[in-house]
Amino acid sequence: MSRLTHINAPNGVFPAAQYTHVVMGTGRFVAISGQLSLDKDGELVGEEDPATQARQVFDNLWHCLVAAGGSFRDVVKLTYFVTDMAYMADIRAARDTYMDPEHLPASSAVQVCALVSPKFLMEIEAYAVL
């Protein structure tokens, strides 16, 4: 497992509430492609339900991290692609069941007009240092 340093309030930058401004680590870099709300059989989970989709996406991220030999403790950056920013509360709730809210990764959230299918409400990618 990598050793990560979280800097929530760099000098001259307003402190972050829902993410960490800077996360530094040493080790092996892992990039995880954007995950959608698909189960292991490729079936959509949570049609029109952002909370259920968020939980499935974080479950998929967890499986990817484990496959790389890591865990959510190793995540340094999350990027959220959402079709509606109103889904961020559900995403944060799902995230907080997997991650320590006191040591959150750096993050970006982007509202997009569409994902690969209109049934998907979000896609989340992760970077980790193992």
Image: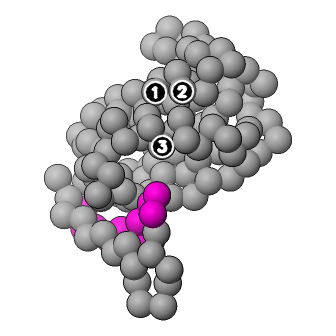
Give the label on residue 51, or none.
2
Of the two numbered discs 1 and 3 on the same chain, state the one appearing first in sequence. Answer: 1
Q: What is the crowding at mark 3: few (fewer than 14 residues within 10 Å), some, or many (at least 20)?
A: some
Q: In this view, does 107 lie to the left or right of 83?
A: left
Residue type, label 2: Ala
Q: Does the magenta stretch include residue 23?
A: yes
Q: Can you identify the residue that label 3 sits on?
A: 92
Q: Quadrant of residue 120?
A: top right
The residue nearer to you, when weighing 40 against 107, is 107
Q: What is the crowding at mark 2: few (fewer than 14 residues within 10 Å), some, or many (at least 20)?
A: some
- Numbered disc 3: secondary structure: helix
Q: In this view, does 13 lie above or below 20?
A: below
Residue 83 seen in the figure: yes
Of the two numbered discs 2 and 3 on the same chain, state the one appearing first in sequence. Answer: 2
Q: Horizontal and vertical percent for residue 5? A: 26, 70
The stretch in magenta equals: 17-27
Give the label on residue 72, or none.
none
| Numbered-mark total | 3
Q: Is residue 28 above or below residue 119?
A: below
